[in-house]
């Protein structure tokens, strides 16, 4: 029952992350750049976590501090900037599908670098079923091969960075609380993003933040999608493992389909329903494993 609660946390987190592309798109249309959105998002999130996690500023060792630096870099700066840049260079469907390979990459890295985790037919079949379902939901019977090597490689980089992020958190969660880890991620994510301002200077005017459409979307991305969701995700990873938690990334297209049906009144096609079923089946198979 306790594990069920953390599985629910992971699902709720993915459901919220599944709709954040709308908030980001609105802010981009208002004139903000991906870098500006990321910096404001993580700055507010860091301030929020600092209010409730202030008992210590540094970790127990320099080695751990370097791991936290890597967490913020790969799970914050690298992930968001590569994903958002990829959206500008290649098809949205390509980015959506490639980023959803994060659980598969997490599994491969775990098998290669973590003792006690071995490939099993259940793990492979579950992952392949979920990936097939993701493809069916995203492309919905209208597959169009249009490659952009740089954009697709950036999307793959985003997926790989999230896989590394998930595995590093698992190694740190035995010694640090999820709240402390979350705060460190925001700090180092923000710190490693600031040098990019040299190449991409800030252009968005300060008075632009007075617009309700801007500050409301930024608050949602910062407080809900970052402060709360990063904490719940990190907590889920620490309790049920990196592989099981990461597999819920496959549910991202499912939440998009359901949200589109409920709020945008878009029809649920037979292809999207079949794909969603395969995703759910694949996730269920992997989560039966003791990993």
Image (cartoon, helix red, strand yellow):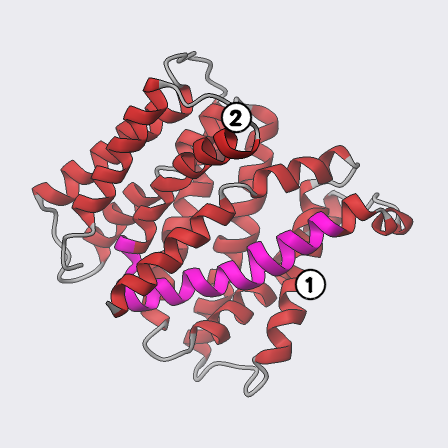
Position of the N terminus by quadrant: bottom left
Q: Nearer the viewer, residue 42 or 263?
A: 263
Given residues 159 and 250, the one toward you in this image is 250
Calculate the distance from the C-alpha at mark 2 to the C-alpha at mark 1. 28 Å
Q: Is residue 275 left or right of residue 154?
A: left
In the image as oriented, which residue stretches furthest toward the left?
Answer: 121
Alpha-carbon neighbours of circle 2 within 10 Å: few (<14), some, or many (≥20)? few
Task: Tell me the quarter of the picture where residue 263 sits.
Answer: top right
Whether 284 is among the magenta residues is: no
On screen, 217 above or below 194?
above
**Residue 202, image x and y in percent?**
80, 47
Left/right of residue 148 with respect to residue 239 in the rendered view: right
Q: Which residue position is annotated with label 2?
A: 92
Q: Could you tell me which residue is drawn at 24 percent across and 48 percent down? A: 107
Determine whether 280 is above or below 179 in the image. above
Look at mark 1 in the image and give the residue it sits on.
Answer: 44
> In the rendered image, which quarter contains the C terminus?
bottom left
Residue 58 appears left or right of 271: right
- Determine the residue positioned at 12% across, 47% down: 119
**Residue 225 visible at all:** yes
- In this view, which residue lies farthest toward the bottom? 55
Identify the residue shown where x is 37% and y is 26%. 137
Q: Secondary structure at mark 1?
A: helix
Highlighted range, magenta: 216-244
Q: Quadrant of residue 5?
A: bottom left
The picture places residue 103, in percent across and down from the top left corner, at 31, 45
Does residue 228 belong to the magenta stretch? yes
Residue 90 pos. (x, y %): 54, 23
Q: Earlier in the sequence, mark 2 or mark 1?
A: 1
How many numbered discs sit on the rendered protein?
Answer: 2
* Disc 2 secondary structure class: helix
Could you say which disc has been placed on residue 230 in the image?
Answer: none
């Amino acid at each position: 029952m306790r594990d069920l609660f953390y599985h629910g946390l992971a699902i709720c987190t993915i459901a919220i992350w599944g709709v954040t592309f709308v908030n980001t798109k609105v802010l981009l249309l208002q004139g903000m750049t991906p870098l500006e959105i990321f910096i404001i998002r993580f700055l507010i999130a860091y301030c929020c976590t600092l209010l409730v996690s202030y008992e210590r500023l540094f970790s127990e060792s320099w080695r751990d501090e370097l791991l936290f630096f890597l967490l913020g870099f790969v799970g914050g700066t690298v992930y968001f900037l590569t994903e958002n840049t990829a959206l500008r260079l290649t098809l949205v469907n390509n980015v959506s599908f490639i980023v959803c390979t994060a659980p598969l990459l997490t599994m491969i890295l775990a098998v290669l670098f973590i003792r006690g985790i071995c490939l099993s037919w259940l793990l492979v079949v579950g992952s392949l079923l979920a990936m097939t379902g993701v493809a069916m939901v995203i492309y919905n019977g209208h597959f169009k091969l249009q490659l952009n090597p740089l954009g697709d490689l950036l999307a793959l980089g985003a997926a790989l960075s999230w896989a590394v992020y998930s595995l590093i958190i698992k190694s740190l969660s035995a010694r640090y609380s999820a709240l402390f880890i979350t705060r460190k991620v925001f700090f180092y994510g923000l710190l490693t993003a600031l040098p990019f301002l040299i190449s991409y200077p800030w252009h968005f005017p300060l008075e632009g933040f007075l617009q309700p459409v801007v500050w409301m979307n930024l608050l949602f991305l910062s407080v809900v999608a970052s402060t709360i969701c990063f904490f719940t995700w990190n907590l889920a990873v620490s309790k049920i493992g990196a592989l099981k938690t990461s597999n819920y990334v496959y549910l991202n297209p499912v939440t998009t389909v359901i949200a589109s049906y409920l709020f945008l009144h878009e029809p649920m096609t037979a292809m999207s329903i079949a794909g969603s079923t395969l995703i759910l089946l694949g996730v269920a198979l992997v989560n039966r494993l003791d990993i």
